[in-house]
Amino acid sequence: MFAGGPFALFVTCLVSGLLVPLPEDVALLVAGWKVREGDLTLTAALAAGFAGTLCRDLVAFGLGSVIGPRLERLPLVRRALGEARLARAHALFERHGPRMLFFTRFAVGLRAPLYFVGGSLAFPVRRFLVLDALGLALTVPVTLWLGNTFGEDAAAALTVALSHQRAVFGLLVVAGLSAWLVQRARTRARA
């Protein structure tokens, strides 16, 4: 997987979750295994994994800050979400944004979307960088260690767990959308 060495790990982490529907955790687990096999140095894996993931997170955050406000101004989006919900989302993020952005680092599959939201709600980029770097300082070494300790089996186990997580997340999205449609139909029936 990392025939290109640290550069390949950097690029893999950079595109993960954005262009490739797998999180960087899989690449980091494989990189940890490659460190154990002697195909990659620990220093190079740490640097490439940290830098690639931080750049990816900044891309998601930056896209949110550029595209998010424009999406929010669209009449279709404002009607679908409603002024009150948008105001609550802004207030919630104002109050809990730093914690949400930090702890998202530990939630596989939710990182890029929440970083996009953080950017779209004008969270300060410097604070985002600090929170993300702190989270990465914890997760990158631990994930590399897991890959080093458990080898190829760790990446396979994470891939299986992610397939189930996506199914659960998909069901939650369908349930939420269904509840919203039912509420919307009841509101229209009352009017």
Image (cartoon, rainbow, N blue to C red):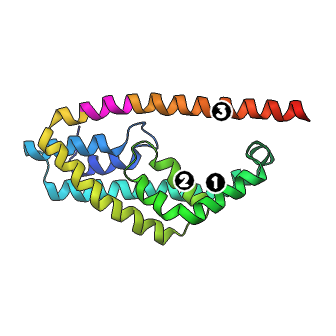
* 25 or 107, nearer to the observer: 107
Residue 115, compared with residue 81, is above or below; it is: below
Question: Could you tell me which secondary element the residue under label 1 belongs to?
Answer: helix
Residue 6 located left or right of residue 59: left
Residue at mark 3 to residue at mark 2: CA–CA distance: 21 Å
Left or right, 118 with respect to 140, comes to: right
In which quadrant will I find the C terminus?
A: top right
The residues bearing labels 2 and 1 have C-alpha atoms spaced at a distance of: 9 Å
Mark number, residue 119:
none
In which quarter of the view is residue 65 placed? Answer: bottom right
Pointer 1 residue? 67
Q: Residue at x 14, y 37 (%)?
A: 151
Mark before the other along the chain sequence, 3 or 2: 2
Q: How many neighbours does mark 3 have within 10 angstroms: few (below 14), some (14-19), or many (20 or more)?
A: few
Most foreground residue, 33 or 184:
184
In x, y percent, where is residue 145? 17, 49
Q: Is residue 43 magenta?
A: no
**Which-is-in-front pick, marks 3 and 2?**
3
Mark in the foreground, 2 or 1 = 2
Q: Kindly identify which numbered label has been placed on residue 177.
A: 3
